[in-house]
Amino acid sequence: IHPLTALDIEEASIKGNAEVDEVVVGPQGLDLRARVHRFWERVRLIAGDQLSIARLRALEAIRAGQEAGYGGFGWGVWIPGLFHAKMADVQGFFTTHFGKPSSSIQDPGSLHFHNTLLERLPITITSLPNFQTCRSLIFVSLYARVLHCLLKVSGKATLAEYADSVGSWDQLYHDVERIYITYTDASVVAELRSKRELLGKEEGDMVFENAILFLRDALITREFTDAVRAGDSGRVILVLKIWALSFRGNGRTKYAYEMLHLIHNLENVWPQPVRDAVLNNWLISTNGRSFLEVDLMQEHLNYWIKVFYKAHGSNMSWRWLAMITPCVNALRELARTMNDALGYDQGSKHTSVDPVNDIHCIMESLDDRGTYDLTLGRVLEDDQEVADATSVGLHNTITGTSCPLNEFNSACSRLQRRRRMIPV
């Protein structure tokens, strides 16, 4: 990882992003203009957050057929940041499953109910806390639900009793498979809601329906996290295909559009060598063990540059930032070496909070309130019916004459036509 010099360029525009790349290929950056003949004929991978990638893609569309060579930006392979997509998923998850705090009868499976149950700081859906806090609440609730459902499918009273009864991996796999079939099937939700709509409130069970959708969506979020840590691009792509629909369903339309672009490019546009280059570089391992998203690595560098090593007070200047930025990794390694030599380093991680008590607390609540027991006629006030974001997203993507899928196909066809034009 080799950080380039910090630049005094405003990136909050299409023009600003173009200016940044011009510096990157110039003497202050990779110096491609001097070192590589006709360097724009070589593919270059650029990864970043959704907004930066959208601006670069817009620049490519604007200049297609108008400019050739480097200025046409047809050489770019744009890789949307997976970490920013993961944050969008968590935000969308809260939008869907947070519940309604103002309701007199709370959904016992909602995130708001569990956050209150665990006596954590109050959460406002319009001003969410940091990403780690939000994801922690989702995962603690997920673990409790999985263990609660494990006891239900096995017929055991406690986890200790179940642990004593498990004699083989096949038995555990069979029980987990029963959880998946019984408590994550969205078609069951659709059937119950259809009956309630046709026959009245005596049919269906809002609490059970919401709980099924929560477990399914949370497992997808957990799967993406595990896939990234393992560096498994195949599993990542499978989740991104689901997110292309669920982002549309929970209001993250810009990220839904990015997922469409990425999937289309992976399957239909990029040749095999380019596809392999993308899949081998959008996840990186900086320690030789677990992987992380390349845009998360960029955010880490931003922290060390903008917060830790920047000058403070009257000494703060772009000249200082330009000098210190390429040296960030060397300075961090020097700090580690000095700490090791002096015995001062006390570790870089806080002790993880033990979630056992929180998990047991939620498990007891799920059992007491029968969250995963089908009770016909159980309804919630204020229309707390959780939307099936994936199904809603699919419907919104393909329905109507001006649906997003048609607009996407039209944009791709328009870009193809302009690419065939020879610039004057």
Image: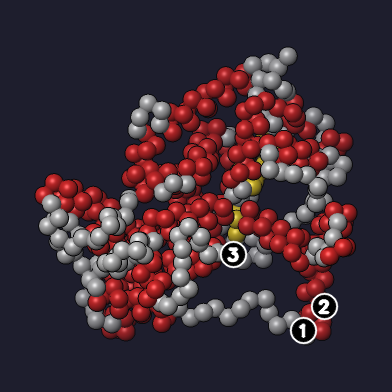
Quadrant housing residue 391: top left
At label 1, counting other C-alpha atoms closer than 10 Å, the crowd grade (few under 14, some 14-19, many 20 or more) is few
Tag 3 or tag 2, which sits nearer the N-term? 3
- Relative to 297, does residue 265 appear above or below in the rendering? above
Secondary structure at numbered mark 1: loop
The answer to whether the residue labelled 2 contacts the one labelled 3, judged by CB atoms less than 8 Å apart, is no
Tag 2 or tag 1, which sits nearer the N-term? 2
Cα–Cα span, label 1 and label 2: 8 Å
Which numbered marker is on residue 344? 1
Q: Amino acid at mark 2?
A: Met
At label 2, counting other C-alpha atoms closer than 10 Å, the crowd grade (few under 14, some 14-19, many 20 or more) is few
Near-viewer residue (397 or 1)? 397
What residue lies at 65% left-to-right and 24% top-to-bottom?
A: 64
At label 3, counting other C-alpha atoms closer than 10 Å, the crowd grade (few under 14, some 14-19, many 20 or more) is some
- Which tag is nearer the camera, tag 1 or tag 3? 1
- Determine which residue is flagged by label 2: 338
- Determine which residue is flagged by label 3: 290
Near-viewer residue (181 or 205)? 205
